Image (cartoon, grey):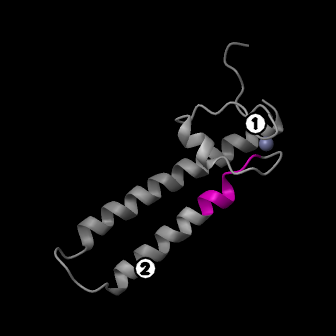
Amino acid sequence: MNKIQQQYRKRKNIYLALIVAILGVIISFRILSPSGRHTMNTLELFQTAFLIVIIISIFVIFRCPKCNKSLVSNFSSLWGKLDYCSKCGVELNQKKDR
Ligand SMILES: [Zn+2]
């Protein structure tokens, strides 16, 4: 495994952790928020801000280690089976059958 692949793997793990964090925030929204229509309280405001920060960090962090292209859309459209960068073609995943 070369440096690019190691870096990609690290970024992918952070990306997946952030996705889990988003799900956690969404679930906490449902659990902690009072039901029915109401004005936004401080907690919900904080959760919304946190959600936005996570989404921005995903796009900032999850990039190609070589050319810096954002990999979020490619990664999600291929269901995580992203082996090459679509811009510079660098190999992101080490092939198992080698
Ligand atoms: Zn690239």
**Residue 61, magenta (yes or no):** yes
Residue 59, labelled with which disc?
Answer: none
Q: Residue visible at 26% across and 65% down?
A: 30
Locate residue 35, reporting x and y percent: 17, 73
Locate residue 82, reporting x and y percent: 64, 33
> Residue beneath label 1, please?
5
Magenta region: which residues?
57-64
> Which residue type does callout 1 highlight?
Gln
Farthest residue in the top direction? 97
> Residue beneath label 2, please?
46
Left or right of residue 31, residue 4 in this image:
right
Asked if the beta carbon under badge 2 is closer than 8 A to the nearest atom of ligand 1, the reply is no
**Residue 97, magenta (yes or no):** no
- How packed is label 1: few (under 14 Cα within 10 Å), some, or many (20 or more)? some
Near-viewer residue (10 or 93): 93
Q: Residue visible at 83% across and 45% down?
A: 66
> Which residue type does callout 2 highlight?
Phe
